[in-house]
Image: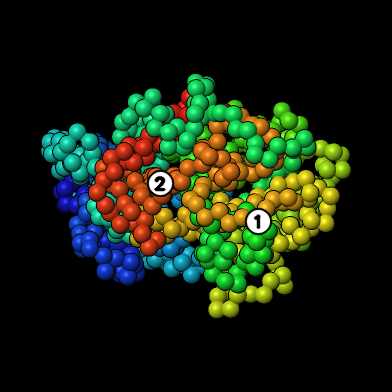
C-alpha cells in the first residue's frame, strides 16, 4: 500500500470520528437553529474544512517518518506509528465524547477552559465523577472497543510502505507535503484559516457545531500563548493607543491626565463622614438573574435576596464582565473589565502592582482579607490577592470542624459563620476592614448540606436551582447574624454574582445570560431600585462612594450617585467582546468584521453598522491590553 493510501486511510478515520460527533450535535441541538434564517446545512461543509485542518496537522509526523526514514528503521517506524495512531484516534474519540457534557455546560465546544481546569485535578475530577458517570462509562466503553479492534487489525500495517524504494519515497514527500500544507492552512492567502472561519453564520449554535473540538482546544492554547507578544490583539483590528485611550475615557466618562495610570482620577464621596465605614463584598458563585425575583427572575428561589432588596440598593439591570469567576472577581474587587486572553488573576504582569480595593484602602488603615470556602490556590486567587495588597487569606484549610465539606470546599453557611467571627474580632480591636467573601455551593456538582432549605419542586436535589436556594439561605443567615453585631452599623455590604450560572443562547453573544443580581445594603443606606444599565465596576464604585472617603482610583465604572455614571457595559464571551450602550451593541471578534445589533426582546437583532460604537468596542480591547502589558492599571 502506498504512502498516500496509508495517510488517506487514517485521514478518513479521523474525519469519520469528527463527522459522527458533529452530526450528533446537529441533531441534539437542532431546535436551537431550525427556525433561523441561516443555511445550517453548510455546517457540514465548513465543518469538513475545520476537520481537515485538524487531521492534516496530525498526519505531519506520519508523513515525515514514512517518507524520510531509511529501511533499516522500518520496524521501529511501524511500531511507533501503530501506537501513535492508537493514541491519536483514542484521544479524538474521547474528546468527541467529552464535547457533549462540555457543550451542555458552556454552550460551546471545548476551548482553553477545557485545558485550564486540568491544573486542578482534585476539584475537576471530583465534579466529573459526581456528575458525569454515565458519560464516562460510555466514553470508556467506546475506547475499550476501539482499542481492541485497532490492535487486532493493524499488525505490521506500515511495513509494506518500505517495499517502495527510498528514492521513490523521497520523491513522494514533496507533493504529499504540499497537499498537507494546503490542508492545514486551508487557504492560499497569506493567512491560514483558523477557528474564526467556522463562524460563517449569525447563529452561535451553528457556528459552534461547525468547529472542530481538538482544533478548538489547540487554537485556544496557541492564541493564549501568543498574548505575550500582543500580536493576537491585532486580530480584532488596529488602533493607535492614543485614540483608543481617548475613546475609552470618553465612553466611560473619565477625565484623567495621569500617564502612569490613564484611568485614575479623584472621586469625591457623596456621603462624607468623619468615620468611614468598613466594606464587605460577598461574591456569589454563578448566580444568574433568572433565579432572583427581585431583578426579574423566577419566584420562590431566593426569598432572602428578595427580602433584602427592599432594604438596600438593588441593581435591576446589572451585567457581569464575562463568564468566568476570575473575570467577576476582577470586576468586583478591582473594577477592571475583562482583559483579552487569560484573566488578570492568572497573568504574570498583574501579580503585583495591580489596583485592588486592598491597595486603595490600605493607606486609610484598613485590614484586608479574602475569605473563601475552597482552596484559594484555585485559579491563582491566593497569589493574586496577596500580591496585590490583601493582608490575609482565609481558605478551606483554616476552617476548623466545618459542618459540611463538598467537592469545591466548605458550605456557604460555614463561610458566613467564619466571616462573621473574623469581622467581630477586628471591630473589637477598633480595626477597620475590607473583606471579599466568595461562595462555593452553586457549582457543579452542587453539593450543599441537607435540611437547610425547602427543596424546589420538580428539579433534582443536586441542581443549580436548589444550590442557589441554599446560597440564598446563607446570604440571609449572614446578614441576619451581622445585624446582631456591633460592626453592622459601620459596614457597607455588597452582594453580587461573579457571572451567570451558564451563559448559553443562540445569539453571537448571549447578552441576556450576562444579567446578574447585585445589592448594596447597610445601616443608613436608603432603599432604592436602580433601573439603569450597570456593571460590576459600577457596583464597586458605588460601594466605595458609600463608605464615605474621597478616593483616587482607576475603576472602569462610576457610582450611581455620580453625574459621570454611563449607561454602558462591556461583556466578554470567550474571544468575542460586546460593547453595549443603552440598547445598541457592537460585537467584535478576532479575524471578523464588527457587527452592530439592537438588543430587543432579550435577543440581538442585526442593524446597520454603527461605526463609532464599533470603533469604541475595539478601543476597549486595545486599551485593556495596553493597561495590562504596560502595568498602568494602578
Q: Secondary structure at mark 2?
A: strand
Q: Tell me how the rendering is colored.
A: rainbow
Rendered location of residue 409, percent (x, y): 67, 55
Q: Is residue 448 left or right of residue 175?
A: right
Q: Is residue 482 left or right of residue 219?
A: right
Q: Secondary structure at mark 1?
A: loop
Q: Is residue 240 above or below residue 179?
A: above
Rendered location of residue 326, percent (x, y): 54, 45
- Pointers 2 and 1 in contact (CB under 8 A)? no
Indicate which disc residue 428 carries: none
Q: Can residue 632 be spotted in the picture?
A: no
Q: Is residue 546 above or below residue 481?
A: above
Q: Residue furthest toward the right?
A: 428
Q: Closer to us: mark 2 or mark 1?
A: 1
Q: Residue at x 19, y 52 (%)?
A: 8
Dot 2, crowdedness within 10 Å: few (<14), some or many (≥20)? some
Dot 1, crowdedness within 10 Å: few (<14), some or many (≥20)? some
Q: Is residue 629 above or below residue 112?
A: above
Q: Quadrant of residue 359?
A: top right
Q: Residue at x 82, y 42 (%)?
A: 426
Rendered location of residue 352, percent (x, y): 60, 29
- Quick one: label 2 or label 1, which is nearer the N terminus? 1
Q: Is residue 90 left or right of residue 281?
A: left
Q: Quadrant of residue 143?
A: bottom left
Q: Residue at x 47, y 48 (%)?
A: 322
* Residue bearing the label numbered 1: 527
Relative depth, front residue between 533 and 186: 533
Indicate which disc residue 581 carries: 2
Relative depth, front residue between 379 and 563: 563
Cα distance between the residues tagged 2 and 1: 26 Å
Amino acid at each position: 500500500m502506498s504512502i498516500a493510501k496509508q495517510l488517506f486511510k487514517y485521514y478518513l478515520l479521523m474525519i469519520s470520528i469528527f463527522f459522527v460527533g458533529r452530526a450528533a450535535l446537529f441533531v441534539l441541538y437542532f431546535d436551537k437553529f431550525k427556525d433561523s434564517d441561516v443555511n445550517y446545512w453548510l455546517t457540514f461543509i465548513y465543518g469538513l474544512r475545520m476537520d481537515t485542518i485538524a487531521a492534516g496537522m496530525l498526519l505531519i509526523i506520519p508523513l515525515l517518518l514514512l517518507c524520510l526514514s531509511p529501511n533499516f528503521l522500518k520496524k521501529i517506524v511501524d511500531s511507533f506509528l501503530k501506537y501513535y495512531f492508537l493514541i491519536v484516534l483514542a484521544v479524538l474519540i474521547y474528546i468527541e465524547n467529552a464535547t457533549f457534557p462540555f457543550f451542555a455546560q458552556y454552550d460551546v465546544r471545548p476551548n482553553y477552559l477545557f485545558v485550564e481546569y486540568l491544573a486542578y485535578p482534585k476539584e475537576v475530577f471530583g465534579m466529573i465523577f459526581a456528575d458525569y458517570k454515565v458519560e464516562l462509562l460510555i466514553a470508556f466503553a467506546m475506547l475499550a472497543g476501539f482499542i481492541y479492534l485497532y490492535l487486532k487489525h493493524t499488525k505490521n500495517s506500515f511495513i509494506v510502505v518500505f517495499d517502495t524504494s527510498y528514492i521513490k519515497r523521497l520523491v513522494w514527500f514533496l507533493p504529499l507535503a504540499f497537499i498537507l500544507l494546503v490542508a492545514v492552512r486551508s487557504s492560499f492567502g497569506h493567512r491560514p484559516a483558523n477557528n474564526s472561519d467556522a463562524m460563517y453564520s449569525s447563529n452561535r449554535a451553528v457556528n459552534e457545531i461547525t468547529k472542530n473540538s481538538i482544533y478548538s482546544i489547540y487554537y485556544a492554547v496557541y492564541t493564549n500563548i501568543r498574548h505575550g507578544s500582543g500580536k493576537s490583539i491585532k486580530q480584532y483590528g488596529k488602533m493607535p493607543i492614543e485614540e483608543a485611550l481617548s475613546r475609552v475615557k470618553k465612553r466611560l466618562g473619565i477625565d484623567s491626565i495621569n500617564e502612569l495610570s490613564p484611568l485614575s482620577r479623584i472621586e469625591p464621596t457623596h456621603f462624607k463622614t468623619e468615620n468611614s465605614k468598613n466594606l464587605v463584598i460577598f461574591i456569589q458563585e454563578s448566580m444568574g438573574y433568572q433565579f432572583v425575583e427581585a431583578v426579574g427572575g423566577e419566584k420562590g428561589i431566593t426569598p432572602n435576596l428578595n427580602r433584602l432588596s427592599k432594604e438596600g440598593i438593588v441593581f435591576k439591570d446589572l451585567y457581569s464582565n464575562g463568564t468566568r469567576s476570575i473575570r467577576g472577581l476582577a470586576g468586583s474587587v478591582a473594577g477592571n473589565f475583562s482583559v483579552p486572553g487569560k484573566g488578570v488573576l492568572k497573568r504574570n504582569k498583574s501579580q503585583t502592582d495591580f489596583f485592588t480595593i486592598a491597595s486603595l484602602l490600605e493607606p486609610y488603615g484598613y485590614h484586608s482579607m479574602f475569605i473563601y470556602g475552597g482552596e484559594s490556590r484555585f485559579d491563582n486567587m491566593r497569589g493574586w490577592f496577596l500580591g496585590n495588597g490583601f493582608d490575609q487569606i482565609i481558605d478551606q484549610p483554616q476552617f476548623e470542624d466545618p459542618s459540611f465539606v463538598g467537592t469545591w470546599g466548605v458550605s456557604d453557611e460555614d463561610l458566613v459563620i467564619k466571616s462573621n467571627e473574623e469581622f467581630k474580632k477586628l471591630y473589637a480591636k477598633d480595626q477597620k476592614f475590607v473583606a471579599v467573601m466568595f461562595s462555593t455551593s452553586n457549582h457543579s456538582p452542587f453539593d450543599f448540606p441537607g435540611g437547610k432549605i425547602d427543596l424546589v419542586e420538580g428539579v433534582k436535589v443536586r441542581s443549580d436551582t436548589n444550590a442557589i436556594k441554599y446560597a440564598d439561605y446563607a446570604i440571609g443567615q449572614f446578614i441576619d447574624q451581622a445585624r446582631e453585631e456591633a460592626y453592622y452599623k459601620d459596614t457597607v455590604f455588597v452582594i453580587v454574582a461573579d457571572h451567570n450560572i451558564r451563559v448559553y443562547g443562540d445569539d453571537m453573544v448571549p447578552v441576556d445570560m450576562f444579567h446578574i443580581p447585585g445589592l448594596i445594603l447597610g445601616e443608613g443606606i436608603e432603599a432604592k431600585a436602580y433601573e439603569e444599565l450597570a456593571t460590576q465596576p459600577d457596583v464597586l464604585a458605588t460601594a466605595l462612594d458609600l463608605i464615605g472617603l474621597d478616593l483616587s482610583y482607576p475603576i472602569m465604572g462610576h457610582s450611581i450617585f455620580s453625574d459621570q455614571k454611563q449607561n454602558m457595559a462591556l461583556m466578554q464571551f470567550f474571544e468575542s467582546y460586546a460593547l453595549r450602550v443603552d440598547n445598541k451593541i457592537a460585537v467584535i471578534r478576532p479575524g471578523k468584521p464588527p457587527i452592530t445589533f439592537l438588543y430587543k426582546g432579550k435577543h440581538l437583532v442585526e442593524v446597520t453598522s454603527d461605526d463609532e460604537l464599533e470603533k469604541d468596542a475595539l478601543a476597549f480591547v486595545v486599551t485593556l491590553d495596553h493597561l495590562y502589558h504596560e502595568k498602568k492599571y494602578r
